[in-house]
Image (cartoon, helix red, strand yellow):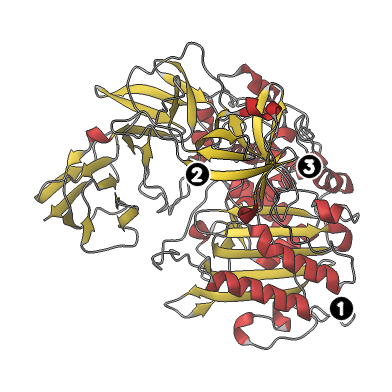
Amino acid sequence: MFKKITAVLLASSILLLTSNTGLAEASGVRKRASIDYSEAIKTARETMWKSIAGGFCSGATVAVADEGKIVYAEGFGAADRAANRPVNPETRFNVGSTSKMFAAVGILLLVDDGKVRLDDPVVNYLPEFRMKDPRYRDITVRMLFNHSSGLPGSHFYFGYAVDENMHRYLIDSMAEAYLKHAPGAMQIYCNDGFTLAEMIVERVSGEKFIDFLARRVFKPLGMKNTGVSVGEAGVENTAEYYGLKNGKKYPREVVMVYGAGGLSSTASDMCRFASSFSPFAKRVLSDASVAEILKSQPTKFYDKLRGPQILNEFGWDYSSLPDYADLGIQVLAKSGGTTCYSTYMQTVPKHGVTVVYSITGSVADLEELSRPILDAVMKAKKIQIPPAKPVEKPVEARPVPEELLKFEGYYCNADSVVRVRFDRDNGKMELAAPAEVAPGASKEEPAVMSLVHNGGYFYYHEKKMTLYFTVVDGKTYIAAHKVPNYGVDMLMYQKIEKIENPQKLRADIAGKKWLVRNMPAQVVYAMVGLVEAKAYEALPGYVSFGGLKKIEGPDCAEIAATAFRDQSSLKLVDVNGETWIKSNMFMYSSEDTARKLVSGVNRVTIKTEQWNEWLKSDKGAVVKFGELPAGSRVMAAGGEGLVFDSAVDKGEFYLPKGGLIIFAGAPGDMFKVYAY
């Protein structure tokens, strides 16, 4: 459900002298004679170095604040390998979605000023915001922060250059979109809500969002190393990103949706920010607004599962960690992940403890890195911490009860479709890959996961996964119970309802690759621009294109996975006599429209419409390019992913049979491609 969730806590009672740690008195570290943080520091170092040694990142930083003061800060690994420049406490990282908490504070500052009311409709402040779904008028400012607006997804991209059009992309896309659910009905992670919040801050304050934050937040809190993303900021002391698989240094990442995820900072500055919600540090918000940002913001869905859920808060991922809550201690956390960086911010306002870490890369579970450090800091302060979880044995299989058999069928989430089937007598549930409608496709539905039944739950012991079925407001879901490290329940799949009179699109899009045609040249390396459309034998009336969609007519299909993040509708449009797909911000044409890569010289020109051009190889070839136009981009994909990216690669490369090359640039840009 989340792309990332992470955080870190620490503190120091000793003076560290190693030059590349940056832990001298000049860097803000202080001695706390009454508290010995040495074990917490050891835990932090072990955690960060394990992430680097494990190949999850090349550089990391961590800081701890206690009662408003930075008591520990350290950098790990290389910020720039060629320059032999290490990460230190002043090194900047993109902080991704932890930026959302600055959007939250920005709005609450305007609430304090009497200029914004949280329960006013968003359209009161942004009259240009419109949707096809008339319920959009019911979206309030508060709903943007507890992720209950119902907005479909994320309308922006990560890039390597400044693009000032992100607000326009969102407004234009929303004008053609429908909500996933009624405003306030349930919480589903949504980036676009925070971009709308950023726009409200600008409209009401009359300032650029980043200027408003600099004046009202960064400067008052002493955040000297915080601002726009690293690719826009141009700060020398930046943690460069190196590909985790290829080790190549990529251009600095630019994120232009500041309120949703576009800021850069240091771990120490982020500690100063989070400490402002405690009673021990300087605040920029009123007491009433601090109370607002710390309290639960429940949706109508918050109590519909068997255990507590996350995202029912004012911007945070969670505002209550169950095992700490059992001890009467509130822990709040916010994660942030971009293509190139990950950040985790965890704070305990009552005790004045905050831990933040950032890495150049990603890990599957950011909380897993943070939690040992938090526990160590709390222990150093003589505060009770939750007991260690006991080691559990695998459960014994019990026959699947008759009442659960009705849950057989097909389910989906934002990314995948599975078939649920039961082996009743042996007490098992299988999740299988559904058979596709495609030439030569197998009709078999092989199991991809098998879980053991016991007491109404289904267990996958090796992955510490526990699932159960639930029906809420007539919809059937599979939920995960007591997710490790969080202790909360999360939706995993939503049942796909059978369509009595299934419709078809006017063009058969399934079984083909679709090629993006309006991708900017500056997008980050992860966006290759290929989407494979699928249809399933057992699901007539549905098509999968970046998520399952229900066909509503000959030209459109709407979101089927309405309980999951980052979804979009699909529309068929005619362009130059060809049928293309419009989904999210992007346009796609069929793989059949790509020109054939021929032996010898190939010439490609970006036409006046600025559409991307594509070449496809029908046999393996060695490829090289002539001098590329300034500001253009060429990427090639084949086999398991990218084989060439002009942002980091030069010279010749091998393109396997079926490989594709995408060209992006300005109208009139010309490319020479040599193949042999």
| Mark 1 → mark 2, Cα distance in angstroms | 50 Å
Q: Is residue 164 left or right of residue 670?
A: right
- Say which residue appears at 57% left-offset and 51% top-offset: 262
Assess disc 2: are there few (<14), some (14-19) or many (≥20) residues with their C-alpha within 10 Å of its C-alpha.
Answer: few
Q: Earlier in the sequence, mark 1 or mark 2?
A: 1
Can you tell which of label 2 and label 3 is closer to the viewer?
2
Assess disc 1: are there few (<14), some (14-19) or many (≥20) residues with their C-alpha within 10 Å of its C-alpha.
Answer: some
Q: Tell me the residue that label 2 is attached to.
A: 448
Q: Is residue 31 left or right of residue 411?
A: right
Quarter of the figure with the N terminus: top right
Residue 354 location (% of width, % of height) = 77, 63
Q: List the single residue furthest toward the bottom.
A: 17
Which disc number belongs to residue 308? 3
Q: Earlier in the sequence, mark 2 or mark 3?
A: 3
Observer-nearest of 399 and 55: 399
Observer-nearest of 616 and 657: 657
| Mark 2 residue type | Val
- Say which residue appears at 67% left-offset and 31% top-offset: 149
Observer-nearest of 195 and 423: 423
The secondary structure type at the circle numbered 3 is loop
The secondary structure type at the circle numbered 2 is strand
Q: Earlier in the sequence, mark 1 or mark 3?
A: 1
Can you tell which of label 1 and label 2 is closer to the viewer?
2
Residue 453 location (% of width, % of height) = 67, 41
Q: Tell me the residue that label 1 is attached to.
A: 35
Residue 510 picture quarter: top left
